[in-house]
Image (cartoon, helix red, strand yellow):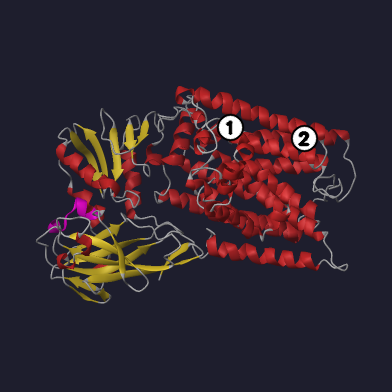
Amino acid sequence: MTNDESPISNNQSHVSRITHAIYLLIIAITLYVAVFGWLAVRRHAAFETGALDLGNYNQAMWNAAHGRGLALTTMPNFSLNRMGLHVEPILFLLVPLYWLFPSAVMLLWVQTLALGLAALPLFLISRRWLKSEWAALAVSVAYLLLPSTEAVNLFDFHAVSLAPLFMLWALYFLDKAVGMSSITNHQSPITRHIRDIAVAILFLILAMSTKEDISLHVFMVGVYLMVIRRKWTLGGGIAALGIVWAGVAFGMVIPAFRVGGQQSAYVGFFPALGSTPLEIALSPITRSALVWGLVTRPESLRALMMITLPFGFLNVVGLPVFALTAPTLAITLLSNNPLQQQYETWHYTAPMLPFISLAAADGLRRIQNVKFKGQNSFYILSFAFFIAAVPGYHFLRGYSPLAKPFYLPEVTAHHRAGDAFAARIPPDAPVIAQAELEPRVSQRRQVSIWKGEMPAGDEMLWLDVAHPKFVNREGAQTNLLSALVLDESLGIAAADDGYLLLKRGAPREMPPEFYSFLYTEDARWQSAGEMARFGDELSLVGVVPHTNRDTEPQVTLYFRVLRQPVADYFLRLYLLRDDDTPEGATILPQPAPIWLPTSKWETGKIVRVRFNTLPWWTGDGEHNRFGFAVAVARKGDNPQADPWDESLRLPVGGAGVLPGNLVRVQKFYRLAGMVYAE
């Protein structure tokens, strides 16, 4: 590649003007920030954020704002300071903003604003490369509609989400200084040249301050400048900057703050590749067959499709720029942590977002130069495929209201009660909190994540037994109830609507308002007709399916108590094949009947039971269509065999009745990996 063919060369400045394309870009960014800021805050209001990582960041920021550095207490086995987990000095620059708005909500808005505004430098660079504002606008909108971008935005808060904005501005100023297009060979005055390089380096430093591994991408940018552009001095300096900061961050800062001077957690993600950073770095050479196997496994190939197909594979054509994703690609695709290959669920793609987006512009620029018999028909076809792929992929897998799997968290009276409950906890009290509750009480000196243990000293334990993520797996809820019954020194400081605040020495009696999460006075269910009747004691009057993208669906069933049951029945959910044949059944009880057994259900009440403890996984590729059925059964003596003993089930009548006294309650289907209720 010659200098003029490279996407890096000098270019003249565009005359500043507001065009139709720029107006549309401003509208797109504004809509993105408004919609995803609202969704992020709504997720938090619906208690769908957690200790990992919004709670961690909130406590660290609160401590920093009070002059205690980035101290945190939620991961004592790893570090008592955020710097022992990740090197993120950018957080100190956010402290003045935290003084003004001391809230986790502020962090969510900062994250959204940064991700949205990153589309601006992306547009400016793409405009130079493509010599077209409309093509540049398409690339920028593709970035905003990319499900991976939106996943970074909606999964709690992470400092690395600020990296795309800083990195893209750094590349923009490098573009001005040494060129990233072939528009002109005009050289800027030396002072402007130096200024642009200085500003670019400043933005590279800001990008590196968001997370330690961004330094590896800075190193790749330097290598790119040296190898592709032959800018040996500048490229070598930037590469050295990245390597030096990587050495400081990984080799000095993290061990200094980590318990026992341990290395970064990254090292533990690659046990098959080596036990030291050097062994892991050399594994593509020393263990090439193993590395190739990891890169080509189904999970890795799906991850690669998530960042290439939405751009119509144009970023693959822009391979020299796409290669700048190599550090994060290696970390995520070679990791033994399966979450890191889920690019459209978590935040792991954040460091790659600038490069996978710019690579699409680079690919489009390269195709512009491909002509057949003097015509650029290949460019037209490629651009048309790109324009179709962006909205099509977003419709199938995006997060916005334009997407089919769009999910709007429901904020209920239960959540508002949780906020009021959190306000009642003394601000100086040490608290152990359920992960989903921890962000509400993270602004304190001592807070821990509950892992099943009971308070040993003067800590207060805050739980929400009604939270959908508090499943009864391994008997977690059953064990909690047993501890309350058997541990006579453990009392109930407060309880309301499923929330429990436990403390040693507090009163032992459970207040009646605790059980309100089990009953509903909603007129919709009070007046609902009967769907099915179980014996002469219970009738099913309502079903609410719960789907959220590709996660396992759940259901809430509403039962009218016709007559107070004489026994404690087992409410059992069954997994149905598409032909209604049962193939799976719940073994452990659901939370609702643990806290209020059926023998205590009062006549005339409507009881809601959320089935969240499910032993199956329908995302295995073999359940494109499936359903759920329910049975009310007497308890037997064999938990494994009881689900299939039809003699234990109460007789049932009504709609959706299946053989064996089962009632079909809901059908589901999967499309492009997402679950939908029929």
For label 1, count other residues whose C-alpha is less than 10 Å away and answer few (under 14), some (14-19) or many (20+): some
Disc 2 designates what residue? 235
Which of the two residues, 171 or 346, is positioned nearer the viewer here?
A: 346
Looking at the rendered structure, the kind of residue marked 1 is: Glu
Q: Quadrant of residue 443?
A: top left
Q: What is the x, y in percent for residue 431? A: 33, 33
The answer to whether residue 241 is left or right of residue 298 is right
Q: Residue at x 82, y 61 (%)?
A: 370
Mark number for residue 57? none
Q: Which residues are magenta?
A: 592-600
Q: Does 506 sit above or below residue 43?
A: above
Q: Residue at x 85, y 33 (%)?
A: 191
Q: CA distance from mark 1 to mark 2?
A: 26 Å
Q: Does 591 sit above or below residue 538?
A: above
Q: Does 343 sit above or below residue 572?
A: above
Assign the magenta stretch its main secondary structure: helix
The answer to whether residue 86 is left or right of residue 484 is right
Q: Is residue 430 visible?
A: yes
Q: Is residue 31 visible?
A: no
